[in-house]
């Protein structure tokens, strides 16, 4: 096993355990903190895939902004800060959710295993530049090929910002 | 590294997120599960971009074409940020009107 594989599996186990804790923990604040584990793990996987720009964006936007937004949401809705038994649906619905999730996982594992049997990502011997993943290449692409979707994304963010203010305003 | 390592990891995270959306009652927790789902898709996109970039550089094709993956992942991050902003505003309003953020109490449309 290469060093990349070793680190992949370490990070993957951390991510899966954190994700399971996010959906099972009984403490809202702990769920937000476990979410950081998943998001930071994803940033680490992006580094393994030689995608530096995505890793930095992941840390800045997800861990820096979205998790803080979640913590604000938790505080503003005055959730019980200790453990709470009132976060989950009733038992039947949880079992149905588990069945749906496991079924979905089985279908996806079957399809992926069949389709990509042992296709490899040959990163050894390549540079970030030859992979098209450097920050300059990504920004070139955003501001030339994907300029119109980029502007649309900015308008979407502005609309979401104004929408959130209008909704949350007290009057 | 096999591409399937990343795809399986993303599939597992996606399914955990789906379970969270179905099993949680608290509005903020449902939003967190949706973040898990969107994040799984980002891992897929970046993994495919790395595979394509490696193949393109081997074949001598212009590697800039492989930036599609990171750019799409960037758009997903932007949409996720917008979604969380509006979602939390909705939950805040729900809390103000009902003193609770349990989304199974939203049954005004029930016949």
Image: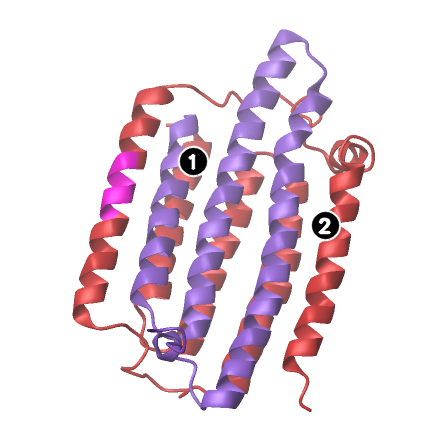
Chain colours: A red, B purple
The disc placed on residue B6 is 1
Query: Considering only vertical position in the picture, is A87 above or below A160?
Result: below
Q: Residue under label 2, please give it.
A: A153
Mark 2 Cα-neighbour bin, 10 Å: few <14, some 14–19, many ≥20: some
Residue B107 pos. (x, y %): 37, 76
Q: Is residue B82 magenta?
A: no
The answer to whether one can see residue A51 in this image is no
Give how far apart the Cα atoms at labels 1 and 2 are.
Answer: 27 Å
| Chain under numbered label 1 | B
Q: Is residue B72 left or right of residue B96?
A: right
Residue B18 pos. (x, y %): 35, 54
Residue A146 pos. (x, y %): 75, 35
Identified at 32% across, 83% down, the residue is: A83
| Chain under numbered label 2 | A
Please provide the residue range marked out in magenta. A102-107
- Residue A168, by quadrant, is bottom right
Closer to us: mark 1 or mark 2?
A: 2
Identified at 36% across, 87% down, the residue is: A82
User: Which of A69/B54 is in front?
Assistant: A69
Identified at 27% across, 35% down, the residue is: A107
Q: Secondary structure at mark 2?
A: helix
Mark 1 Cα-neighbour bin, 10 Å: few <14, some 14–19, many ≥20: many
Most distant residue in the top direction: B59
Identified at 38% across, 59% down, the residue is: A18
The disc placed on residue B83 is none
Q: Is residue A50 left or right of residue A171?
A: left
Number of marks in the rendered image: 2
């Amino acid at each position: 096993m290469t060093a990349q594989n070793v680190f992949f599996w370490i990070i993957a186990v951390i991510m899966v355990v954190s994700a399971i804790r996010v959906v099972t923990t009984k403490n809202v604040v702990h769920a937000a903190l476990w979410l950081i584990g998943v998001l930071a793990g994803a940033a680490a996987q992006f580094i393994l895939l030689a995608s530096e720009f995505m890793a930095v964006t992941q840390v800045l936007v997800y861990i820096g902004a979205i998790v803080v937004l979640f913590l604000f949401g938790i505080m503003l809705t005055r959730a019980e800060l200790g453990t709470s038994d009132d976060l989950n649906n009733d038992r039947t619905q949880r079992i149905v959710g588990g069945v749906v999730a496991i079924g979905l996982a089985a279908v996806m594992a079957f399809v992926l295993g069949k389709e990509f049997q042992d296709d490899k990502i040959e990163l050894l011997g390549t540079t970030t530049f030859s992979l098209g993943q450097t920050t300059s290449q990504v920004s070139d692409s955003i501001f030339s090929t994907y300029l119109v979707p980029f502007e649309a994304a900015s308008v979407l963010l502005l609309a979401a910002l104004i929408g959130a203010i209008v909704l949350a305003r007290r009057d | 590294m096999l591409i399937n390592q990343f795809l399986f990891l993303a599939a597992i995270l996606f399914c955990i997120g789906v379970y969270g959306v179905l099993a949680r009652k608290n509005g903020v927790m449902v939003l967190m599960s949706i973040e898990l789902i969107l994040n799984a898709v980002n891992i897929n996109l970046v993994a495919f971009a790395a595979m394509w970039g490696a193949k393109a550089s081997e074949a001598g094709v212009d590697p800039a074409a492989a930036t599609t993956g990171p750019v799409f992942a960037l758009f997903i991050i932007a949409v996720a940020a917008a979604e969380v902003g509006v979602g939390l505003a909705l939950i805040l309003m729900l809390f103000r009107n009902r003193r609770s953020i349990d989304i199974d109490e939203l049954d005004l449309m029930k016949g």
